Structures are given as C-alpha cells and as structure tokens.
Image (cartoon, coloured by chain):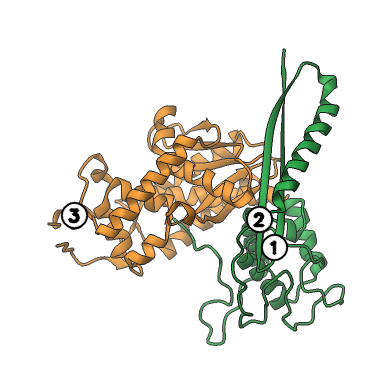
Amino acid sequence: MIATVEPIATAKPKSIAELRQTVSASRLNTWLSCRLKFYFHYVRGIRKPKTAALHVGTSVHGILKLWNKARWRRQPFTVEMAREQFDTLWQTDQAQEKVRWEQGEEADEKQTAWSLLDLYLKRSPIPPNEMPEGVEVSVEADLAQHGLPKLIGIIDLIRAGGRIVDFKTVGQTPKEEKAIHTNEVQLTGYALLYRANTGKVEGGRDLHQLVKTKTPKLIVTQQGPMTQPQQTRLFRQMESYVAGLDRQDFVPSPGMQCSMCSFINECKRWS
Amino acid sequence: MALQLEANYSKKVGLPGYSSHQFSLSLKSELTDLNQVPAEAARLYRLLQDGVDSSIKEIGWLPEAKPTNGNGHSNGNGHSNGHPRNGNGNGAQQPNGSSEAWNCTPKQQELIIKIVDDNRLDKAEVEKLAQDRFGKGVKQLNKLDASGFIEELFERYPRQRNGNGQGNGYQRQNAPAR
C-alpha cells in the first residue's frame, strides 16, 4: 500500500501502459535510482517546487541553447547579449515554475549561474564558427524489434561530425571515469537515438561539465562512439524497466541519493 | 607506416506506403603510399556501391497501405490536399517540387507539409532554409535534421491556435522527453 501526503502540485499522471510505450534516459535513470521516486513522479504525477540547483541548470542550458542556435543560424551572440538573455530567462522560468529558495539564496545562485556561462562562453572548446549538426533536437528510436519501448530524448548539441555533447552543471569536480559511468544511460541512449535517426555512427560523446566551485571550472570528458556492451547494458536496463512496470514493482531504494530527494516525506510513509 | 582508408557507402530508397529502406556497407583498407588513395578510393566506392545495389533490390516486407487521412494527405510518395501553393505555381505538392522519396518519417513529412500549407510558404524559401541550415534539400533531411527543421519552422511561424483559442494546430512527433 502506498500512501502519500497531499501533493503540492500534480502533473497528469501516466498509466502503466503509457509508461511502457516510451522511455527517456532521465525516466530510466529515475527508475534505476529509486522505483518509489519513479512512482511518485511519473505514475502519481506529483510535482515539487524546483530546487535552486535545477533552476541554475535550466537557466544555463537555456542560454547555451541560444548560443548554439545562433551559431547554427550564423547570427551574432556576444557575452553581452547572453547576459541580457540570461537575466530575462532567470525570471521567466520562475514565472512558469516556482523555485524553492532558501533565505537570500537567489542572488548567490544567479551569480553562480552567470559565472558558469561567462566561463563557458569564453573557454568553450567549440570554435565560434563551427556549425552544429543539431541543437536541442527531439528524437525517438523504435526498439520494437528488441521487444523494448520506444526510446525518446532531446540531445543538447550535435557538433559537426556527429559529436554528441551533453551539458551538465555539477556541484563537485568530476573524475573522468565516474562521470562516464554515472552518465552512461544518457550517453548510450543519445548514441542509439543518433544512429536511429541518421543511419550513421556518432563521432563521439562528450560531457561538458560546468562545475559550481568558488572559481567555476569547465571539465570536458570525451568518449568514443557507443560500444556493443554499452548498448547491451542499456537494453538490459530497459528490459528491467518494462518487467518492473509490469509487476508494479515500486519499492524504495534507500541510499545516498535520498539526501537530494524531494519525496523523502512521501517515502517515509510508504509501507 | 601503413595508412588506413575507411570507406562507407549508404543508400536509402523510398518505397510505397510511406516506407523506405536503407543499407550501408563499410570497409577498411590498408595502403602503404598516399599516392594510392585516389585509385583505392575509386575502387572501394565501386565495390561498396555494387554491394549495396545488389542487396537493396530485395525489398522484403512492406506495411499495408493506409487509407487516406482526414486532412487530404494520401499515402504513397505524393499527396494532394487541394491547397493552392505559393512558389512556382505548378501544383507540385512538396516543398522542393520533385517526386523523390523523403528521408524523414511520414509524420515529419506530413508536419512539414502542413506548416508550409497553413502558412502559405514559398517552397523555394523553405528549400533555401533547409539548404542553409543543413546543406541539403527538404526531402534529403534525415529524421534528426527534420526534427530540428520542424522546430525552426515552428519558431519562425508560430503554431496556429484552433477555433476556441486552446492548444495549437500542430502536434510534434516527439513530446519533450525529460
């Protein structure tokens, strides 16, 4: 029996049948990290106010999208233009989705977000005249022949030569091996999506991680194209997702991740 | 030092019922001298093309033809919706006016055509936009390109509201996935 406290807000709940039809990397990651969290978020549709970290991430992503689109359209996009857009986006995003700020937190977080962007725009490894192959492109891959749901996703950036880039804002300086491991589902999923939608093998898969340290840092982690074992692992994880949904296996997975989880109160009531 | 030459040949062919199939072959060859590249590249190209061509003739299974849908688009490689077009005025139904198959999905094709129709866009302009953004024509856009192209069209030509002011007239093939 799963009992919850009154939700703050709800999205349209999804049926099990609906959730079985498609899966994204973020949904699969939630499933793999905690099935009860998955239940609250996707099945029940409970929505909590956005965290400060998420708002920083969304704002940074929004400006990087504009920067990438400007290169794609061969339009100018200066740091000054970025700052202006950033100030607007910071407010408009909050108007759409409330952010849970601690006392006096917002100004510091805004400064952090802008510092990350300022660093990236000045130190990006992507040449300013490099034309992207795709920007925030929404794609899907039909995996019915493998007995799996349709994989869906939005790829942040595809550089010339099919190099997939995912932007991340992170709290701690990542170690390369760990970053590759923890982002495996996402990067393998993007490779599958790229191949299914272009008929070509991706040129590589890069993480551009913006680290929210006192002095911001940019860490670029590069990987080659998806390997067969990586594809097999993703398929096995998707099989587990389908089988678990069929069983309605929504047990909690207490662990380190609970410190960041917004469903902690609902979880404690679960039995 | 051995030089490695990697060649890939891919062909996608449109089939009836909004279908298409494609086949790719890749191979690597080792050379000892850079001067051998032109001859070896030509040899590999011919070899791979012959290999692909001989196999791709086998069409295999095809989905059953679907009936014409409500908005007047019939299946197959052409469509007819009765709307007059801007542009060359020859009544051709697709943005670049030729009859070859599209590389994107049928849904993406339908959506691009619908945006062009609804906004009465000049086909030449639409074709130019595709060339500018992707270096290829509208029909040559693969699924990934088409997704970006549709997004670009949506930004340039905001989605139309329906009669009661709710929602919009277009539905993306892919919902946001996060």
Dots 1 and 3 on the same chain: no
Q: x%, y% of residue A180?
A: 44, 33
Q: Which residue is mark 3?
A: A267
Work out whether residue A106 can be spotted. Answer: no
Q: Which chain is orange?
A: A
> Callout 1 environment at 10 Å: few (<14), some (14 to 19), or many (20+)?
some
Return the residue nearer the eye: A199 or B49.
B49
Q: Mark 2 and 1 residues: CB-CB less than 8 Å, in contact?
A: yes
Where is residue B88 drawn, in percent x and y?
87, 73
Under mark 1, the amino acid is Leu
Please determine if labels 2 and 3 lie on a single subunit: no
Residue B110 seen from this side: yes
Question: CA separation, marks 2 and 1?
Answer: 7 Å
Image: B74 above or below A191: below
A46 or B61: nearer the eye?
B61
Tell me the kind of residue under disc 3.
Cys
Dot 2 amino acid type: His
**SS for tag 1?**
strand
Give the residue at x 43% y 49%.
A25
Letter of the chain that mark 2 sits on in the rendering = B
Q: Considering the image in quadrants, where does the C terminus of chain A appear?
A: bottom left
Colour in which chain B is drawn: green
Q: Determine which residue is flagged by label 1.
A: B15
